[in-house]
Image (tube, coloured by chain):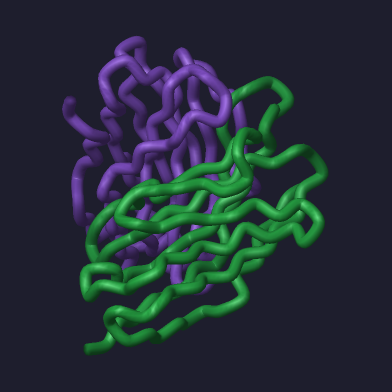
Chain colours: A purple, B green
Amino acid sequence: KAGVTQTPRYLIKTRGQQVTLSCSPISGHRSVSWYQQTPGQGLQFLFEYFSETQRNKGNFPGRFSGRQFSNSRSEMNVSTLELGDSALYLCASSGDRANTEAFFGQGTRLTVV
Amino acid sequence: AQSVTQLDSHVSVSEGTPVLLRCNYSSSYSPSLFWYVQHPNKGLQLLLKYTSAATLVKGINGFEAEFKKSETSFHLTKPSAHMSDAAEYFCVVTPRVLTGGGNKLTFGTGTQLKVEL
């Protein structure tokens, strides 16, 4: 079956702009999580969506937001971009059971200039 | 609260020799533990997971890990390294039961494995 698909793969934005990233989970998975990966902070949890509702949230400012659609596809939005938002953003999808493994997409590389 | 400490940021081994990547965890709850691997320009791939069954967990590509509660460790091993094992490895912890359900993975800082001829 198809894996987790993230689009676009690469993005370059200017400070102050906003950006939207997209994630299509594995068919049948209703949980979608987002992670930020940077050399300095490593991999950090942003938020998780399940059945169109945010179920868990990390410690990121309100500029980072997300949503999930009825087909489980998810989008992540970052407003008022800062240089420090440059990162690899990874999306993961999981089945409904607790502690089931998370399947990751290849990520979107965001560069803020 | 939960956290993971990967004790080595870089490990270098010769092809055919054993691999040991060390991980210690801290968790207020009974943890589930995972090891993921990330090859350059690729996403994360699950190597193995511990969720409360056998403490010795076997994963893909010959990797295994042992959950030791008394030592709060979950070290990753492989008897014989291959060139294709060169990648970054992440130890991950999550509560076995998260209030409200769901998934919230806490990653270690990663260990870069180099395999030399």
**Left-right relation of A34 to B22:** left
Residue A50 x/y as whole percent: 49, 19
Q: Residue at x 73, y 25 (%)?
A: B99
Residue A34 location, quadrant: top left
- From where the camera sits, is residue B32 visible? yes
- The residue drawn where x is 71% and y is 55% is B68
Q: Nearer the viewer, residue B62 or A81?
A: B62
Place residue A78 in its image quadrant. Answer: top left
Reply above or below: B56 against A110. above
Residue placed at 46% from the left, 15% from the top?
A52
**Is A88 left or right of A61, judged from the image as shown?**
left
The picture places residue A60, in percent across and down from the top left corner, at 60, 48
Q: Nearer the viewer, residue A8 or A13?
A: A8
Q: Specify the farthest residue to the top.
A: A70
**Residue A94 as seen in the image, left or right of residue B75:** left
Tell me what residue is drawn at x 40 percent, y 58 percent. Answer: B63
Q: Quadrant of residue A73?
A: top left
Q: Nearer the viewer, residue A75 or A29?
A: A29
Q: Quadrant of the C terminus of chain B?
A: bottom left
| Residue A63 in view | no
In the depicted structure, whether residue A30 falls above or below residue B58? above
- Identify whether B91 is placed above or below A75: below
- Total labels: the figure holds 0
Residue B72 is situated, as x and y percent measured from the top left of the image, at 75, 58
Q: Where residue B57 sits: x, y (%)?
A: 52, 46
